Image (cartoon, rainbow, N blue to C red):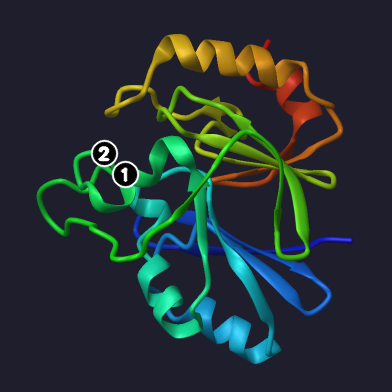
């Protein structure tokens, strides 16, 4: 049984999720160099199975290098977005405070995946960015900036697409409504509630 811990980090208040299974942890979207992530994991003496990124925008990846340096763990992202980690134009940090990670990420393909003790289904969900992905893990839907409580992610950034977002939303409508939705920003919700109230899914 997975336990989820949420850390809200960075000036854009991105959600970093720590997924716990016994003494193992999977880090999702470490979007800040804030030491809270490292401190929390060291406090539990956890085994870190890896870092998973829902997509490659800077506010979800900035803490990757710090954690890899500290713990020597692998990093995973949809194969369509591995280049985002080193490209400030694609990760939307071009200009001031550019993000160019040193870490090499492992590109994932859609389908059933395993990272350490964590098994999940990875689903392509483009629209916000070309390689935005949804992770279905037990009763959780970890969706990055695809879907928010009452809203969706913007589509006007590089590699974003309104057409692809519409297709992604149609796909989401076919998923099990009992999923607990863990978005990249904001409060958690349920897919059932979003199907009833989110204007983009009605």
Q: Position of residue 116 (x, y in %)?
A: 71, 65
Q: How many marks?
A: 2
- Residue identified by numbered label 2: 90
Name which residue lies at 38% across and 62% down. 10
In the image, 108 versus 129, the foreground residue is 108
Relative to 53, does residue 146 appear above or below in the rendering? Answer: above
In the image, 163 versus 187, the foreground residue is 163
Name which residue lies at 41% across and 27% down. 130
Relative to 95, does residue 116 appear above or below in the rendering? Answer: below
Residue 1 visible to the viewer: yes
Name which residue lies at 35% across and 64% down. 103
Gap between marks 2 and 1 measured at Cα: 8 Å
Identify the element where label 2 is drawn. loop
Choose top left, top right, bottom left or bottom right for residue 195.
top right
Q: In the rendered structure, which disc, 2 or 1, sits on the residue that comes first in sequence?
A: 1
Quadrant holding the N terminus:
bottom right
- Residue 34, disc: none
Q: Position of residue 150 (x, y in %)?
A: 60, 28
Q: Position of residue 174 (x, y in %)?
A: 77, 16
Residue at far right of view: 1
User: Mark 2 or mark 1: which is in front?
Assistant: 1
Relative to 18, does residue 39 appear above or below in the rendering? Answer: below
Q: Position of residue 17 (x, y in %)?
A: 61, 60
- Residue 83, disc: 1
Name which residue lies at 40% across and 30% down. 129
Identify the element where label 1 is drawn. helix
Quadrant holding the C terminus:
top right
């Amino acid at each position: 049984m997975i336990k989820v811990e949420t850390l809200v980090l960075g000036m854009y208040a991105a959600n970093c999720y720590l997924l716990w299974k016994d003494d193992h942890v999977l880090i999702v979207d470490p979007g800040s160099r804030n030491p809270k992530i490292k401190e929390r994991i060291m406090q539990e003496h956890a085994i870190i199975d890896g870092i998973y990124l829902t997509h490659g925008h800077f506010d979800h990846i900035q803490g990757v290098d710090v954690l890899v340096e500290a713990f020597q763990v692998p990093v995973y992202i949809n194969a369509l977005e591995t280049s985002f980690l080193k490209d400030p134009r694609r990760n939307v940090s071009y200009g001031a405070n550019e993000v160019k990670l040193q870490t090499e990420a492992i590109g994932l393909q859609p389908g059933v995946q395993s990272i350490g003790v964590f098994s999940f289904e990875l689903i392509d969900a483009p629209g916000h960015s070309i390689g935005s992905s949804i992770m279905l893990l037990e009763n959780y839907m970890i969706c990055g900036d695809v879907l928010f409580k009452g809203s969706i992610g913007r589509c006007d950034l590089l590699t974003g697409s309104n057409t692809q977002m519409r297709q992604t939303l149609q796909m989401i409508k076919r998923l099990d409504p009992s999923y607990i939705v863990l978005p990249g920003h904001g409060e958690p919700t349920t897919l059932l509630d979003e199907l009833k109230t989110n204007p983009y899914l009605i």
